[in-house]
């Protein structure tokens, strides 16, 4: 036993897969210890806030400020006037304001702005422009006005009579120490409900692993039982079992899965139920392969010896046959777990997974990201980490499986 | 030798296939028909020549394929600069063109609500949601007599059918009579309020309202016939009746593909890929009494998209000009991606919001029959979260527009005295208040499972709306999350649309979501009906409102009195009282405000679409509905 384990861990593939899997598993276990927030709490009011640290503006204005004479990294005006914008201004000046092209120098930001201010009137309706263009120019004008403003924002407070009273001026050299104010960091942004994607992702991985493990265990248990019986007993029992198995193999498992989940209804559809449903529909191929392995084993000498010694059927199965296929069963289970996780993702994608407000699962995260077209908005953080994680889990499980295969199957050994 | 032959054959087959593929590709890439067709034919000939000596089967296949390609390019493309592309209205192959049909999916031509789609069939008047007025179309003017029992409508003498014959009062009368005779849904609906529609002379129609004791039951409803009923030709209707043996079901299921219509566009192409309407250049509306010109786009095309995402991609690529779809963070299209896309308003809420998608509580369900439970759920919901995330900010908040029976437009809000009902409003996501309310009412959790009970039964409800309606689905999730905080178990349930309709129309749900009627001549009366009408609740199949069967005698009395009331002060009193009942009893709760139609336009090909600040008074109804069709006459090509 010790030797086998040692051998297994000598396999590079297995080790690599194992490390990835353990990393994911440990993250799922350790992360919640440090971040105790409810993964389903809707914090952000809006869709898909991008990753980063969010600083309380109110506290920043109230908190003591530090004056830092940092060299200006950029002029505000230069930042607004990128090449495209300058071209846009030039086009407007020539086409709509009738300024001669020779008068315009796009490299001179201030001169360009002066010309713009002299010729653009936000209340005029310039003909020959599309509405979108008109609106874009108006936004540009606002940006330029803001950039040209002198440094300093005035903070005012309302007194008892409702009059505004200046309480503070914020200069562009004012800084606040980030440790003094409340901040919130979303490493992976928020999703469409405004939930922290990272926290949700960890919780989702945990429940997806649970579902996968449950489904894998159930599927392997059923498959193993039926396969052992069919293979060892043979005859009528074999015929009946293989008949049922064939039935299930012919009907696509995913269709049965959809039908069962649909008929179970939303009420009962928790993590456990989804796991059980997936397990109950994905056992047939385990049965078939276990059966064929058992058939080749049952006429071996040591099995015949046991039979002659009068051992009971169960004893023969469990002591003389099972140990020989144990490695195979473990590998089959790993694959079952991996496909269970995928099946959950598929189910949730079509809205038949667990309830959104009760649990987070990888499939549900994908479903909502797609519904709110995160893939079209460029909100990669809402779906890409999920995809990566699903891929990593099945990749690591498959890698472990191949590693095991190499160790246990002499033909594959180097 | 044999092997050689095989080799030659296979080479020939491959070259034939690739040639036909090249022909096909060439066809679909370069949009215009004139250049494609000869090219395709040429390659077809080439294919024929090459394959002649080999098997006959290949030849046949290849030519068939090539022929198909030719056909599809011939039929499929219309010049881009003469075609206006829409999205979000048609979601499958059009199944009929029959305004009386009960199961038509024809979103391109048939949408007989207050702002009716006026492309193919036309109504007598067009509704303009911006000013709440009716604008003349087939009719020129209408007037009520003094006791509001007779409505006289004058018709436009220039109006003509697509077959060239004149549009007369006879057609109007016959259209109405046919609707009633075959009990179409409009016929069944109007016949409760309309006594008869008669032709006085060729250009005058007299609509008599049903009256009780000399007072019309509902003059508002009678007026709405003007802008919601599509006019059909008498002669054509008689043909349809004849070919279906006057059988009600058959007449209603007739596809009417040979339709006769008055509108500016006629059906041109309709398949599972796209639906296209073609301009009728003899359209009567170019007479000076109407538009004085033809609408600008020669074709109105609607590609059949698989889902919202496909439509959105097409919009951002300029393949769609007008898009009636919910788009998450729509402002990013112009702020981040710099696309020439705009909406009605430049800032949130981006659209002209006028309806309230609301959740109805089934008051026949145990637990939900208690007003404390309904109100507690209503109080605990985080509406700002719904508006910010589920609606992506495309709705004003309930702080800006407090709850009532009326929508967020000024025209409707003047009917409610908001100070009088201010004490009934609740704060956003008032979980503590909701918990206190339930505790006070003695609805508590006695068995310690975290869920409150009524008579020993857990308060556990299903909140449902159709699957795939993403903003509604997300709203229901947020409602469910609120339930969890106040010890009421709410599960979301998103069935297919058809089974949701079954549940909703037969009151077989716990909590369901539906949207109130948009702006119209009957508003805000129709919104009052939507929330309270007992009449609706008693229908066997109820599509109209009060899905939860809430009965309130006070509300019913007000609804009876409203249609014939003209005194503004009295109206305000009525609507304020209705709002008070709505907020106090919570038979239904508005979750957000929303436009009736979403509206985003891409100006890569066409420009001069309606926008809020252009002063043209054309509503953002996707250039197709009600008075919004006026936009089609002003469109210009982008230089």
Image (cartoon, coloured by chain):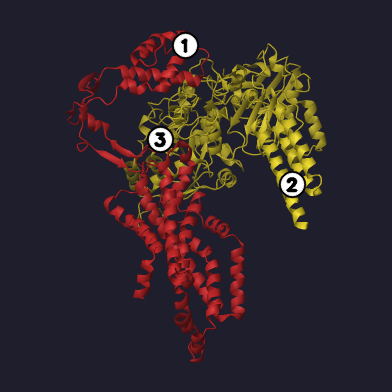
Chain colours: A red, B yellow
Q: Find residue B87 and report its horizontal and vertical position in percent.
A: 58, 32
> How far apart are labels 2 and 3 at the CA level?
62 Å
Q: Mark 1 points at which residue?
A: A94
Residue at 47% in and 40% down: A375
Asked if residue B639 can be seen in this view, the reply is yes
Q: Mark 1 lies on which chain?
A: A
Residue B263 sits in which quadrant?
top right
Q: Which of marks 2 and 3 is in front?
A: 2
Most distant residue in the bottom direction? A309
Residue B482 sits in which quadrant?
top left
Q: Where B116 sits versus B62, above or below?
A: above
User: Any mark on residue B388, and which?
Assistant: 3
Most distant residue in the front direction? B1
For mark 3, give the secondary structure. helix
Q: Could you tell whether B592 is left or right of A162 in the image?
A: right
> How far apart are labels 1 and 2 at the CA level?
60 Å
Q: Mark 2 points at which residue?
A: B12
Question: Decide: marks 1, 3 in contact (CB < 8 A)?
Answer: no
Q: Which class describes the residues within 10 Å of circle 3: few (<14), some (14-19), or many (20+)?
A: many
Residue at 79% in and 33% down: B240
Q: Could you tell whether A167 is left or right of A347 in the image?
A: left
Q: Which class describes the residues within 10 Å of circle 1: few (<14), some (14-19), or many (20+)?
A: some
Q: In which quarter of the image is the N terminus of chain A?
A: bottom left
Asked if residue B485 can be seen in this view, the reply is no
Q: Which chain carries label 2?
A: B
> How far apart are labels 1 and 3 at the CA level?
41 Å
């Amino acid at each position: 036993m010790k030797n086998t384990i040692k051998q297994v861990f000598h396999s590079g593939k297995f080790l690599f897969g194992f490390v990835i899997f353990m990393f994911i598993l440990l993250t799922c276990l350790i992360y919640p210890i440090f971040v105790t927030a409810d993964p389903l709490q809707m914090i952000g009011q809006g869709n898909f806030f991008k990753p980063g640290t969010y600083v309380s503006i109110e506290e920043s204005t109230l908190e003591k400020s530090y004056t830092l004479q940092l060299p200006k990294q950029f002029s505000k005006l230069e930042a607004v006037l990128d090449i495209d914008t300058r071209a846009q201004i030039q086009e407007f000046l020539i086409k709509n304001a009738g300024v001669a092209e020779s008068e315009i120098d796009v490299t001179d930001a201030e001169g360009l702005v002066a010309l713009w201010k002299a010729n653009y009137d936000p209340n005029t309706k310039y003909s020959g422009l599309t509405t979108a263009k008109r609106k874009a120019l108006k936004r540009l004008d606002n940006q330029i006005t803001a950039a040209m403003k002198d440094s300093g924002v005035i903070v005012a407070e309302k007194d008892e009579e409702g009059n505004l009273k200046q309480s503070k001026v914020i200069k562009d050299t004012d800084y606040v120490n980030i440790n003094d104010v409340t901040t919130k960091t979303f490493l992976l942004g928020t999703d469409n409900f405004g939930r922290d994607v990272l926290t949700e992702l960890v919780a989702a991985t945990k429940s997806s692993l649970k579902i996968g493990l449950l489904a894998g265990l159930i599927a392997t248990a059923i498959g193993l039982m039926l396969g052992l019986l069919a293979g060892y007993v043979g005859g009528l029992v074999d015929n009946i079992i293989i008949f049922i198995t064939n039935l299930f193999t012919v009907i696509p498992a995913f269709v049965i899965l959809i039908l069962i989940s649909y008929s179970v209804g939303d009420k009962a559809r928790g993590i456990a139920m989804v796991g059980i449903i997936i397990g109950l529909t994905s056992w047939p191929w385990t049965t078939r392969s276990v059966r064929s392995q058992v058939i080749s084993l049952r006429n071996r000498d040591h099995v015949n010896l046991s039979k002659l010694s009068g051992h009971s059927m169960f004893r023969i199965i469990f002591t003389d046959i099972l140990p020989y296929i144990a490695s195979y069963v473990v590998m089959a289970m790993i694959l079952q777990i991996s496909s269970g996780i995928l099946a959950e993702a598929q189910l949730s994608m079509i809205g038949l997974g667990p309830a959104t407000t009760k649990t987070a699962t990888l499939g549900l995260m994908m479903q909502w990201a797609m519904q709110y077209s995160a893939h079209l908005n460029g909100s990669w953080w809402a779906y890409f980490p999920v995809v990566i994680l699903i891929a990593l889990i099945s990749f690591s499980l498959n890698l472990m499986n191949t590693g095991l295969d190499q160790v246990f199957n002499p033909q594959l050994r180097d | 030798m044999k092997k050689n032959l095989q080799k030659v054959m296979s080479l020939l087959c491959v070259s034939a296939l690739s040639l036909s593929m090249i022909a096909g590709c060439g066809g679909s890439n370069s949009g215009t028909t004139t250049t494609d067709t000869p090219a395709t034919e040429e390659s077809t000939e080439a294919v024929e020549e090459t394959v002649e000596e080999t098997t006959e089967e290949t030849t046949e296949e290849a030519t068939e394929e090539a022929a198909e390609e030719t056909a599809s390019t011939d039929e499929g493309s219309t010049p881009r600069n003469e075609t206006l592309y829409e999205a979000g209205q048609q979601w499958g192959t059009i199944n009929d063109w029959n305004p009386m049909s009960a199961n038509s999916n024809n979103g391109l031509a048939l949408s007989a609500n207050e702002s009716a789609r006026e492309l193919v069939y036309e109504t007598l008047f067009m509704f303009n949601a911006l000013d709440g007025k009716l604008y003349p179309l087939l009719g020129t003017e209408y007037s009520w007599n003094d006791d509001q029992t007779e409505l006289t409508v004058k018709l436009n003498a220039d109006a003509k059918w697509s077959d060239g014959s004149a549009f007369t009062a006879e057609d109007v009368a016959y259209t109405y009579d046919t609707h009633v005779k075959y009990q179409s849904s409009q016929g069944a609906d109007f016949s409760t309020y309309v006594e008869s529609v008669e032709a006085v002379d060729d250009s005058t129609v007299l609509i008599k309202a049903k009256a009780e004791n000399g007072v019309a039951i509902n003059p508002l409803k009678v007026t709405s016939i003007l802008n919601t009923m599509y006019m059909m030709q008498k002669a054509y209707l008689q043909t349809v009746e004849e070919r279906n043996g006057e059988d009600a079901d058959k007449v209603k299921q007739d596809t009417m593909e040979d339709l006769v219509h008055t509108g500016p566009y006629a059906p041109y192409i309709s398949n599972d890929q796209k639906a296209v309407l073609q301009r009728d250049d003899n359209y009567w509306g170019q007479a000076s009494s109407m538009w004085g010109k033809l609408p600008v786009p020669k074709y109105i095309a609607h590609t059949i998209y698989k889902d919202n995402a496909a439509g959105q991609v097409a919009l951002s690529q300029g393949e769609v000009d007008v898009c009636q779809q919910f788009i998450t963070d729509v402002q990013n299209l112009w702020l981040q991606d710099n696309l020439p896309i705009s909406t009605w308003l430049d800032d949130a809420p981006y659209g002209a919001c006028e309806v309230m998608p609301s959740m109805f509580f089934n008051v026949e369900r145990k637990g939900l029959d208690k007003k404390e439970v309904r109100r507690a759920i209503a109080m605990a919901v985080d509406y700002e979260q719904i508006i910010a995330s589920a609606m992506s900010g495309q709705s004003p908040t309930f702080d800006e527009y407090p709850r009532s029976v009326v929508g967020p437009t000024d025209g409707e809000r003047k009917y409610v005295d908001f100070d009088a009902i201010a004490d009934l409003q609740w704060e956003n996501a008032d979980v503590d208040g909701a918990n206190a309310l339930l505790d006070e009412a003695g609805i508590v959790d006695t068995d310690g499972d975290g869920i409150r009970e009524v008579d020993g039964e857990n308060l556990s409800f299903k909140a449902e709306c159709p699957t795939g309606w993403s903003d509604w689905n997300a709203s229901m999730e947020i409602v469910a999350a609120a339930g969890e905080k106040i010890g009421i178990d709410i599960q979301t349930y998103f069935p297919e649309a058809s089974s949701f309709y079954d549940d909703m129309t037969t009151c077989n749900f716990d909590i369901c979501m539906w949207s109130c009627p948009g702006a119209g001549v009957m508003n805000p009366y129709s919104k009052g009906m939507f929330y309270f009408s007992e009449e609706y609740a008693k229908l066997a199949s109820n599509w109209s409102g009060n899905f939860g069967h809430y009965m309130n005698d006070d509300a019913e009395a007000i609804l009876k009195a409203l249609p014939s009331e003209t005194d503004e002060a009295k109206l305000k009193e009525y609507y304020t009282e209705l709002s008070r009942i709505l907020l106090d009893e919570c038979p239904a709760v508005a979750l957000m405000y929303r436009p009736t139609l979403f509206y985003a336009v891409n100006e890569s090909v066409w420009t001069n679409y309606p926008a809020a600040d252009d002063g043209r008074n054309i509503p953002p109804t996707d250039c197709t509905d009600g008075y919004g069709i006026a936009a089609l006459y002003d469109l210009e090509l982008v230089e």
